[in-house]
Image: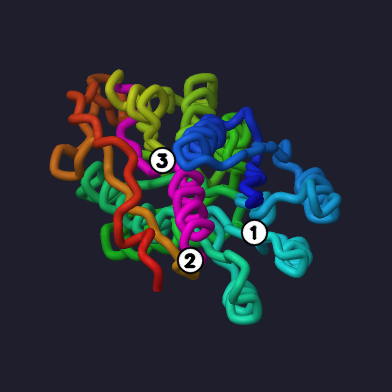
Amino acid sequence: MANLRVLVSLLADDQEFQRLQAADAREAAFLHGLEVEVLFAENNPIVQIQQLFKAVHADPVSRPCAIVTETVTGEGLERVARNAVKAGIGWILINRRVAYLGELIRGNPGVPVASVGTDQAEVGRIQGRQFRSLLPHGGTLVYIQGPPDTSVAQERLAGMESIVAGGHIRVHVASGLWTEKSGEQAVNSFLRLKTWEQAPPDLVGSQNDAMAVGALRALRAFTGADVAHVPVTGCDGLRDGGRRLVDTGELAATVITRSNTGPALEMLAQHLKTRRPLPADVLLPATSYPAEAKLAPLTLPAGSRTPRVEATPRDPEPGPRRLDDSLGAPK
């Protein structure tokens, strides 16, 4: 009987987007007849390595046919990947771009190896266009990126910077860990600097909605100056998360990104049926919420130097998740 067991290894179950990816993996597995086990690494690389090595070195009868993972570390756990592929276990990275993947694909043509992720550079460019729409005359932006050693954070930052260049927007970059707490800490650290008093923040942009919520909390709790109304933008755009916060005026904007686990498992299921090679690198699209054409410059409320965010009319919900035919086609 064919081995249809798949291990999905994700970051932490206290992150909204990671819970979405877990649910998406289970749904895709059900639709395609796969047996899926989802593990969370508590945002700890040691925990994740131990979990994955346990699966790789399990009895051959109990091993998964493939591992689908978003690694805690940015380098993508190369040693674990090589051990997995050596044991005949597929390796599909989620939201990670790493140099070693091409070598693994070339050296192991019979094992499914691939990378599936959102077009992170485009996510950054969308954020950059949002910032220029919200601050058409320039201003000071505090930008909270994820862990700087990850390709997600790097590509989003580079994409954003390529758009805001020349827009008279001063960018202060702070780092977080994709969590609300880290977003709150990043803003608090910025506000403790004396330099910000010379150029108070006009906007806070965050690379995910969780850190954006933490940023909001920090701004509202700060007593040293009136920054409670500084607008904040995020990214991920879950229906009951970032999109709801935009609709109620809590966030100025977000970026809708798709879960990557469903498309990854759909590709894997097709490979197991046809044994055709996987596309090496699949990029999924992202969209602005609200639509970029609907973004208006921020306005200043009476008696305050900081802009105000109006509640945004709901955009139509995007259609159901579907893996484009081109993504599943053999190459």
Tell me which residue sits at (56%, 48%) in the image: 146
Residue 53 location in percent, x, y? 82, 53
Q: Earlier in the sequence, mark 3 or mark 1?
A: 1
Q: Earlier in the sequence, mark 2 or mark 1?
A: 1
Q: Is residue 258 magenta?
A: yes
Q: Which residue is mark 2?
A: 278
Residue 133 location in percent, x, y? 21, 46
Mark 1 residue type: Gly
Q: In the rendered image, which quarter is residue 302 located in?
A: top left
SS at badge 1: loop
Tell me which residue sits at (59%, 81%) in the image: 106
Mark 3 residue type: Cys
Q: Residues within 10 Å of mark 3 (few under 14, many from 20)?
A: many
Region of the chain picked out in magenta, as a range: 249-275
Mark 2 residue type: Leu
Q: Residues within 10 Å of mark 1 (few under 14, many from 20)?
A: some
* Relative side of 283 to 65, left or right: left
Q: What is the distance, in whole Å, between disc 2 and disc 3 at their CAs?
A: 28 Å
* Relative side of 38 to 247, left or right: right
Q: Which residue is mark 3?
A: 235
Tell me which residue sits at (45%, 49%) in the image: 266
Residue 127 visible within the image = no
Q: Which residue is mark 1?
A: 74
* Relative side of 98 to 322, left or right: right
